Amino acid sequence: MIPESESYDRNMTFIVIFLGMLTAFAPFVTDMYLPALPSMADSFSTNASMIQMSLTTCMIGLAVGQLIFGPMSDRYGRKPILIWTLILFIVSTVLCIYSTDIYYFVLFRLLQGIAAAGSIVIARSIATDMCTGKDLVRVMAVVGAINGIAPVSAPVIGGVMTNSLGWQGIFVVLLLFGIALLLACRFFQESLPVDRRSNISILHVPSFFLPLFKMRPFTGHMLQLGFAQTALFANIASAPFIIQQHYGFSPFGFSIVFGLNALVLVFSASITARFKHIERVVIVGNVGLLAFSVAEAIAMFLDCNFIVYECGILGILFSLGLCFTSETTIAMDAGRSHSGSASALIGAVPFAFGGLVSPLVGLGNTLHTTGLIFVLCAVGAILSMRMTRKHDCNQSLY
């Protein structure tokens, strides 16, 4: 007979790995096929902006899906919603693989994003259902570490797949990922008991978001996150074309550069806790984002060499890492009385913002357009920060 403590440890190990895989869905779905974007434009006989539209629809799906499946999992339980979203992901991925028309591919990417959103939002819910206090902190720390590896590894895997199997090979890997998670659901036991489920109709769920929009501090930090995430997605959408087509890197070479850049973002996010006052991190992050964005835009308009371009991107990503961690923490604290809805909005709004801007970087000269978007995002984040200034001055998290 297995001792109770040993059985608990094994179960928690499975849960942590399972949740880590679920939360890694977003970066794998959005980042893994980035090295293939230029070649996909040729494959579908279309332009860069139309291919980037597939990134847009996926991000919109990730945003909308979180707002739908979060409340649904509160109403019907985590496991059934997770299973159905994974089935939808598998079906939509198969449709992507066999797409021969860019318009159908863009539609199927929307479905793929909606389905992947279910795994992301439910993973956060499962962790909260099963853990409290220090246990929750430990689980989320490990899950966060796993999720931090995903943005680095996804484009590298995508680069290898692009060189060997083409863009379809990338979606085959995503298909196998979805199947593996669906099989793993067999070993996952429902984390939300029936007596703890919501009895509110899904039709009334939107009303739960309204109080949050009336909270100035929450809205301000949520908008900051949205503008910061938009700058990140502008980089994600433009980098494959700038690095490969303008600077002449191979798909694999691009994936290495992209992965190393992601490490800078992960590093800056990890040092946020070293600041005595987290509100100051918001200021440093947003001011840094504005300064590096202006410098990068000027460099792009002057047709700078790769080293100058890369230094500007590293500065922007470092600033974004500071923004993401600090603004998420303060926004959740401001929306504590509606934490579930707050989590859904914080997860959905940045993807919605990012999805809207992704196809824009392909219009005209990609370097010029991307540089301009960086500056506009930084200005938007600074203006949003002013909405929260009074709150941050009067209340500190430390």
Image (cartoon, helix red, strand yellow):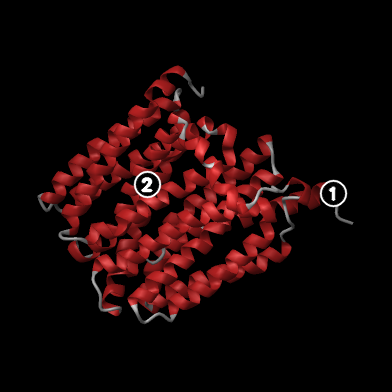
Q: Residues within 10 Å of mark 2 (few under 14, many from 20)?
A: many
Task: Answer whether residue 281 is visible to the viewer in this image.
Answer: yes
Q: Residue at x 25, y 57 (%)?
A: 360
As drawn, 94 above or below 301: below
Q: CA distance from mark 1 to mark 2?
A: 44 Å
Q: Which residue is mark 1?
A: 4
Outermost residue on the top side: it is 394
Position in image of residue 378 (x %, y %): 28, 39
* Tag 2 secondary structure: helix
Check disc 1 and give the amino acid type: Glu
Task: Answer whether residue 77 is visible to the viewer in this image.
Answer: no
Q: Residue at x 40, y 73 (%)?
A: 161
- The residue lying toward the viewer, choosing from 332 and 199, is 199
Say left or right for 315 vs 201: left
Position in image of residue 214 (x %, y %): 46, 33
Say left or right for 15 vs 243: right
